[in-house]
Image (tube, grey):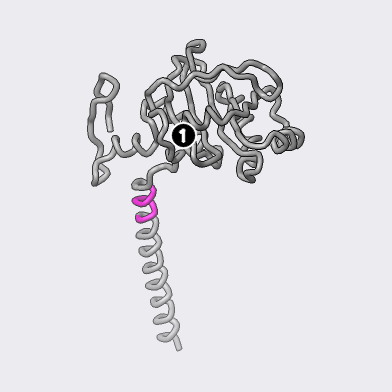
C-alpha cells in the first residue's frame, strides 16, 4: 500500500511539472505573438488627398448657420478632426459621444460632415447632443476627400495638411490618428513596419532628418 502511495505521489509531481512546462511554453508563445502583432489603427480606404498633402479648403455654414472653415492655416498646434458620418449609420451614433470626449481630452477641434436628406439630419440632431461641435451637410466635402465608407476621420494640422485618416469605429481608432501624427507616420501600421525587421530585432533607420532607434 505504501508503494502505491509513493508511486501515485511521484506521478502527481510529474504531471504538475509537465503542466508547468506547457504553461511556460504557452506564455512564451503569447509574448511572441504580442510582439509581432501590429496595433490596429484606423484603416485608410479613400483615394482622396494623401497624407502630407494640403487638405481641400472649404468655408461653409453648418446646420446652425455658423461659418466653418475646413482646412487652411490654424493657430500653431491646433488640430482639426473631420468626422464623416451618416445620420442613418448605427455605428456613427455610438461613436459620437466618444468623439466628443476624445476631442476634449486631446485638444482637437472636431467637425462632423455628412450628406443626405435634411429631414434625417434634423431627426439626428434632435436625438444627439453635439454641443458646440459644427455639423456640416455638404456632398462636396465628401466628394473632394473621396470618402466611401463611414464613420471616417481625417486629421488636419495647423498648417492645413492631412496628417492621418481612416475608418474609425472605436476610441482606439481615433487615438491611432493622434499617435500616427505624433510619430510622423501616416498610420500606425506604417510606423510598426518601419521599426521592425522581419525577425523582430531592433535596428536603426533615418526618419525626419535624423537617426532613430528601431
Q: Is residue 111 left or right of residue 146?
A: right
Q: Which quarter shows the C terminus?
A: top left
* Residue 101 image-quadrant placement: top right
Residue 169, relative to residue 106: is it above or below? below
In the image, farthest residue toward the right: 126
Give the main secondary structure, helix, strand or loop, of the magenta stretch: helix
Task: In this rendered view, identify the residue nearer to me: 202 or 106.
Answer: 106
Q: Position of residue 81 (x, y in %)?
A: 53, 26
* Residue 1 image-quadrant placement: bottom left
Secondary structure of residue under mark 1:
loop
Residue positioned 64% across, 45% down in the render: 90
Q: Residues within 10 Å of mark 1 (few under 14, many from 20)?
A: some
Q: Is residue 33 magenta?
A: yes
Task: In this rendered view, identify the residue nearer to me: 157 or 48.
Answer: 48
Q: Position of residue 45 (x, y in %)?
A: 43, 40
Q: Is residue 80 magenta?
A: no
Residue 159, relative to residue 32: is it above or below? above
- Residue with the mark numbered 1: 146
Number of labels in the image equals 1
Q: Is residue 205 left or right of residue 111?
A: left
In the image, farthest residue toward the top: 75
Residue positioned 42% across, 86% down in the render: 4
Residues drawn in magenta: 29-34
Amino acid at each position: 500500500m505504501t508503494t502505491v502511495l509513493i508511486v501515485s505521489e511521484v506521478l502527481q509531481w510529474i504531471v504538475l511539472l509537465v503542466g508547468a512546462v506547457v504553461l511556460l511554453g504557452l506564455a512564451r508563445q503569447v509574448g511572441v505573438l504580442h510582439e509581432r502583432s501590429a496595433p490596429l489603427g484606423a484603416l485608410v480606404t479613400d483615394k482622396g488627398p494623401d497624407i502630407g498633402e494640403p487638405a481641400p479648403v472649404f468655408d461653409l455654414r453648418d446646420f446652425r448657420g455658423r461659418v466653418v472653415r475646413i482646412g487652411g492655416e490654424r493657430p500653431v498646434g491646433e488640430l482639426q478632426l473631420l468626422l464623416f458620418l451618416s445620420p442613418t449609420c448605427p455605428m456613427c451614433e455610438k461613436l459620437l459621444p466618444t468623439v466628443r470626449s476624445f476631442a476634449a481630452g486631446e485638444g482637437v477641434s472636431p467637425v462632423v460632415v455628412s450628406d443626405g436628406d435634411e429631414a434625417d439630419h434634423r431627426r439626428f440632431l434632435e436625438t444627439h447632443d453635439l454641443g458646440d461641435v459644427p455639423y456640416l451637410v455638404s456632398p462636396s466635402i465628401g466628394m473632394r476627400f473621396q470618402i466611401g465608407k463611414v464613420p471616417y476621420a481625417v486629421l488636419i494640422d495647423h498648417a492645413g495638411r492631412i496628417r492621418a485618416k481612416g475608418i474609425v469605429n472605436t476610441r482606439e481608432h481615433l487615438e491611432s490618428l493622434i499617435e500616427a501624427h505624433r510619430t510622423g507616420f501616416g498610420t500606425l501600421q506604417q510606423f510598426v513596419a518601419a521599426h521592425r525587421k522581419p525577425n523582430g530585432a531592433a535596428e536603426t533607420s533615418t526618419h525626419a532628418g535624423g537617426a532613430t532607434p528601431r
